[in-house]
Amino acid sequence: MSNLAALIAGLLFSLGLVISGMTDPGKVIGFLDLFGEFDYSLAFVMIGAIATHSIIFKLTKGKKPLFAEKQFLPENTTIDKKLISGAVLFGTGWGLAGFCPGPAMVNLVTGELKAVVFVLSMLGGMILFRVIEKALK
Amino acid sequence: MESILYPLLGGALIGLSSSLMLGTLGRITGISGIIGFSLGIPKKDDFWRLSFIAGLVIGGALLIQVRPELFSYQFNFSLPTYIIAGVLVGFGTRLGSGCTSGHGVCGISRMAKRSLLATVTFIIAGIITVAIKGALS
């Protein structure tokens, strides 16, 4: 059942990404082009998502999920260099290509070589992080 | 009005998807984390992650059949740009423990300071990147 719920959530998520325009890298670049041809519309994706999710988060707070023993929420509250430098690197890549991880995955279905190359490079970056993290431990 | 309506609607679907994940599995819908932790040999506990990713891609595959015009955008940059951007996005999201979905939607909905700061940081980094790219071209 939990796998079915995750599958449906994935379907809903991709529908949301496509309808909202988040899968269009040109629109994403427009949203980040504050000093150029700024397109504010994607700000409303975050507004819509946060408005919906924050209500459900409050309603389900501390309650046992339907198919799990407990909620698995991040417990780390420290603001450190890892958080900030990670966000800087991610934001730079996001601005370069106009893809963040979710839309990049959905764009695989276009069959475009550039989308496939982006996703493979993203997976490479994640593996690189894992290798470095292990080496430093 | 329409330029805001679709982003809002899509955003609400994304928020609904994240709420479904929280309510059924008790999990945060952070796509970079879901992908990052799926790399390697899957354990039984990881199947929900693979199911979510499958839903994301299947959703896109269905949508492109029904409404191909929603995918009628171009990938405008050179192949090396997508490689560099992909590595930055992959590495950065793992180092910073999240992307647009995990920090931007779920984290801000939980009022997590770390996520708020990460989101502001990656948006600013994206804006600077697009501005520099614009100045150089």
Image (cartoon, coloured by chain):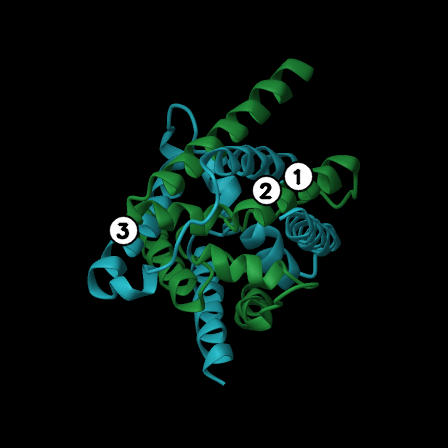
Chain colours: A green, B cyan
Q: Which residue is mark 3?
A: B58
Relative placement, left or right, of B50 versus A56 is left
User: Are callouts 1 and 3 both on one chain?
Assistant: no
Q: Are marks 2 and 1 in contact (CB under 8 Å)?
A: yes
Badge 3 element? helix
Question: Which one is in front, B30 or A41?
Answer: A41
Neighbour tally class for label 3: few under 14, some 14-19, many 20 plus, Cα within 10 Å: some
What is the x, y in percent for residue A112? 32, 44
Q: Which residue is mark 2?
A: A93
Q: Mark number for residue A89?
A: 1
Relative placement, left or right, of A28 versus A10 is right
Q: Chain of mark 2?
A: A
Residue found at x 50% / y 62%: A27
Q: Chain of mark 1?
A: A
Q: Please name the amino acid that badge 1 sits on.
A: Leu
The residue positioned farthest toward the bottom in the image shown: B1
What is the x, y in percent for residue A71? 54, 51
Q: Nearer the viewer, mark 2 or mark 3?
A: 2
Q: Are marks 2 and 3 in contact (CB under 8 Å)?
A: no
Relative placement, left or right, of B34 versus A133 is left
The quarter of the displayed image where residue B59 is located:
bottom left
What is the x, y in percent for residue B27? 50, 50
Q: Chain of mark 3?
A: B
Neighbour tally class for label 2: few under 14, some 14-19, many 20 plus, Cα within 10 Å: many
Badge 1 element? helix
Q: Please name the amino acid that badge 3 sits on.
A: Ile
Question: Which one is in front, A73 or B55?
Answer: B55
